[in-house]
């Protein structure tokens, strides 16, 4: 049974790299995003890494978590009570934290990750990304942020932030702190470069 009694965001006693992944609770219309989520989940299991995600069984969240579990990864889900009541929590996780609300969920996702990967998603994914990006900007953490920009999915977002740089509201240094990749292989290589030196046993 998954553990639902631990303090939200309390790290597990493990030397494995922990990767928090933000992604959609829907599948979207492009099959490549579904395939990427599943393939990345399998890869995390092959690396014996720890996946931290939003706890759902739907959309890209469900795809990456099921694939990671199938490949032997340790998977922690963080889900609010409201969504558990709607029966969208994924069964069979290594650990499931049921928290009071979305804000507590987001903080736990931030606390548990050694780095953050942003896959395609909707408003919730944007909210999570902007939270970790702002906290990085302000110096509250120094954890890497990797954006999976397959097929230019995040191009409009990146163009907006570049406009903010041009207008003097964001610095180029802050934009350059993000690692933007456009393929599964590049995503894997980037994660290995950022976290591969961590112990995995």
Image (spheres, helix red, strand yellow):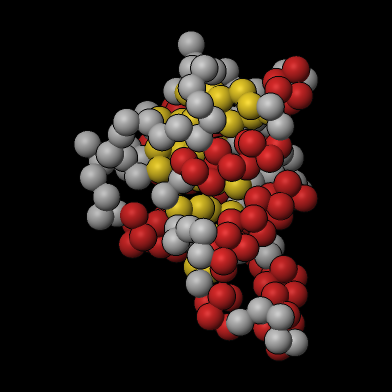
Q: Is residue 102 left or right of residue 69?
A: right
Q: Position of residue 160 (x, y in %)?
A: 75, 75
Q: Residue at x 73, y 25 (%)?
A: 83
From this viewpoint, is residue 39 visible? no
In the image, residue 77 sits, relative to residue 40, either above or below, namely: above
Q: Quadrant of the C terminus?
A: top left
Residue 102 screen position, x and y as percent:
70, 37
**Front residue of this view, candidates 150 and 160:** 160
Residue 56 sits above or below residue 29 on the image: above
Counting every numbered tag in the picture gives 0
Between 197 and 168, the one nearer to me in the picture? 168
Residue 134 shows in the view: yes
In the picture shown, does residue 8 fall above or below 5?
below
Residue 185 as seen in the image, left or right of residue 17:
right
Q: Picture quarter containing residue 85?
A: top right
* Residue shown at 72% from the left, 68% from the top: 157
Residue 100 in percent (x, y) is at 69, 27
Q: Residue at x 73, y 46 (%)?
A: 124
Tell me: 160 left or right of 72.
right
| In the image: residue 51, left or right of residue 21 | left
Residue found at x 59% / y 42%: 107
């Amino acid at each position: 049974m998954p553990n639902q009694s631990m303090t939200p965001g309390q790290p597990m006693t493990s030397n494995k790299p922990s990767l928090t992944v933000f992604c959609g609770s829907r599948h979207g219309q492009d099959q490549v995003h579904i395939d990427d989520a599943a393939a990345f989940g399998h890869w995390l299991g092959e690396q014996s890494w720890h996946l931290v995600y939003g706890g759902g069984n739907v959309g890209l969240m469900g795809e990456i978590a099921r694939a990671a579990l199938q490949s032997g990864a340790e998977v922690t889900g963080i889900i609010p009570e409201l969504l558990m009541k709607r029966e969208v929590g994924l069964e069979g996780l290594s650990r499931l934290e049921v928290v009071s609300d979305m804000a507590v969920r987001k903080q736990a996702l931030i606390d548990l990750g050694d780095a953050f990967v942003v896959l395609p998603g909707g408003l919730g994914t944007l909210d999570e990304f902007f939270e970790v990006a702002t906290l990085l900007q302000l110096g509250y953490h120094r954890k890497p942020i990797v954006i999976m920009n397959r097929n230019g999915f995040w191009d409009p977002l990146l163009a907006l932030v570049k406009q903010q740089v041009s207008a003097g509201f964001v610095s180029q240094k802050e934009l350059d702190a993000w690692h933007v990749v456009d393929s599964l292989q590049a995503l894997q290589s980037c994660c290995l470069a950022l976290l591969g030196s961590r112990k995995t046993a």
